[in-house]
Image (cartoon, rainbow, N blue to C red):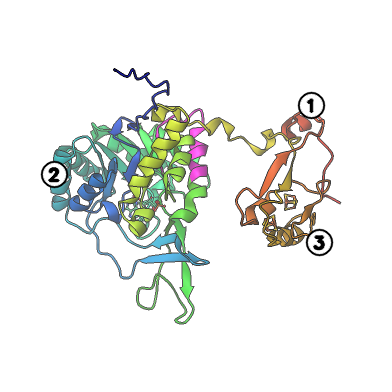
Amino acid sequence: MTVHIEPTLKPKKIVPDLTANTAGIISPNPFWLASAPPANSGNQVKRAFDHGWGGAVWKTLGQPIQNVSSRFGGLHFRGTRAIGFNNIELITDRPLDVNFKEIAEVKKQYPKHAVIVSLMVESEEEWRDIILRSIDAGADGLELNFGCPHGMCERGMGSAVGQEPKACERITSWVMKYSTIPVLVKLTPNIDDIVMMGMAAKRGGANGVSLINTIKSIIGVDLDRMVVEPRVGAQSSNGGYCGAAVKPIALHMVAALAREAEFGLPISGIGGVTNWRDAAEFLALGSSSVQVCTEVMLRGYRIVDDMIEGLTTFMADRGMRSLGDLVGRAVPTYAEWGDLDMNYETVARIDADKCIGCHLCVVACDDGAHQCIHKQAGTHVPRIDESECVGCNLCQIVCPVPDCISMVQVENGYPPATWNEHMAGLGTLRPKKGAH
Ligand SMILES: Cc1cc2nc3c(=O)[nH]c(=O)nc-3n(C[C@H](O)[C@H](O)[C@H](O)COP(=O)(O)O)c2cc1C
Ligand code: SF4
Ligand code: SF4
């Protein structure tokens, strides 16, 4: 007897296409090594590509420098090593000839991967030479390092350029005269207004921007020796801060550019990316590729496996077929404070079945919020006085049990009204809570 097997009715799961395009630089996925030690040499970049990285921004080329020792510092926090990272390293210390030979080799062996060459030199003549050599070596794009906040800026390069709109525009326009491949200007976060610097890069003719470079910082003080860290003998200097701790600053700067209608250039997002979720957030806020430095330095090239798998699953679950379905999706939700709905109201609620009775929420609300979570006799579960709760989120943030405290919307009968509308005489604001 022949058995007839019914074809399955289960819809075929989409496998999203992760191909990324940033200003014409195409890579098989949006994950690039940032210009830094993990992209210092041909062998490293080849190994990274074998692990799955879609692109690499080569360690900045220029006149090779001499580095100091030591040069890195870590910010360790409550048992976690290096949630923040700091360095006083400069650009490449390897001869230009060697770098260009290796770039050409990598491009030959990995024609589909993106190799972007980061550059930092001084005079127009030097820019011309180094650009032509990068193009000859087969680079897919250039990244102009206008961001390094230590050492190079004292020599009139790096963030000295990135903090000065006229210099940024002028040098970008020199580069655009000579480059036949896409050019990204790498912006420094050490400024008041990132949009002003993005616009300067645009006026100079850049094809896109990448951000952020590192944040000017002192990572700590060795209290036994009374010396600033990382220690170079009996002294140190300010360095560049990066790693997980800087992500919020980077996200804000990326979003500020992405939502600026006049700007409109492609963005490569950088700063504190440690996993696929971080990357997806950068993409949702308008980056079309994402660069990673510190997390690779701490955990190795292999982290890209989880990034690719995580992003693929996330996109497939939401029916996203290509990166275009994700890039910029959250940008319209980023508004000015004055345009937020003042009448939207939430309160905290505790799931009694999940609560372990640690009372961290009670302490936080008592000392840091509005004194409206109370211990109760006869049960380990505290009680929230919703008539006093201002919906600030603090208790939810300190609660160690996932989904134990949730913020729920309450209907208060007031239609939406923003502060700006209120000031214009339109819209009534609900009565204040917790202000007595
Ligand atoms: C040790 C070290 C060296 C770096 N060297 C460069 C460099 O040569 N050129 C450059 O543009 N950025 C350089 N960076 C900055 C990174 O490319 C990146 O912008 C920054 O570290 C933020 O990303 P992250 O949080 O993933 O580390 C360096 C960063 C570190 C930690
Ligand atoms: S949301 Fe804020 S005010 Fe409300 S209970 Fe939690 S900590 Fe207190
Ligand atoms: S912090 Fe969370 S787990 Fe601890 S008492 Fe409050 S609600 Fe319960």
Q: Is residue 290 visible?
A: no
**Disc 2 or 1, which lies upstream in sequence?**
2
The answer to the question of whether label 1 and label 3 lie on touching residues, with beta carbons closer than 8 A, is no
- Crowd around label 2: few <14 · some 14–19 · many ≥20 (10 Å): some
On the image, the x and y values in percent for residue 210 come to: 39, 41
Give the image location of residue 5, x and y in percent: 35, 20
Identify which amino acid the numbered label 2 is placed on: Glu
Q: Is residue 160 left or right of residue 331?
A: left
| Image location (x, y in percent) of residue 235 | 39, 75
Question: In the image, is residue 254 part of the stretch drawn in magenta?
Answer: yes
State the image coordinates of residue 25 (x, y, percent, origin top left): 29, 33
Membership of 386 in magenta stretch: no
Tell me where the magenta segment starts and ends, as one range: 251-269
Q: Amino acid at mark 3?
A: Gly
Name the residue carrying label 3.
378
Mark 2 → mark 1, Cα distance in angstroms = 65 Å
Q: Report whether the residue tagged 2 is closer than 8 Å to ligand 1.
A: no
**Residue named by callout 1:** 426
Element type where label 1 sits in the image: loop
Q: Which mark is residue 306?
A: none
Question: Disc 1, ligand 2: is the CB inside 8 Å?
Answer: no
Q: Compute the Cα span from label 2 to label 3.
A: 72 Å
The first of marks 2 and 3 along the sequence is 2
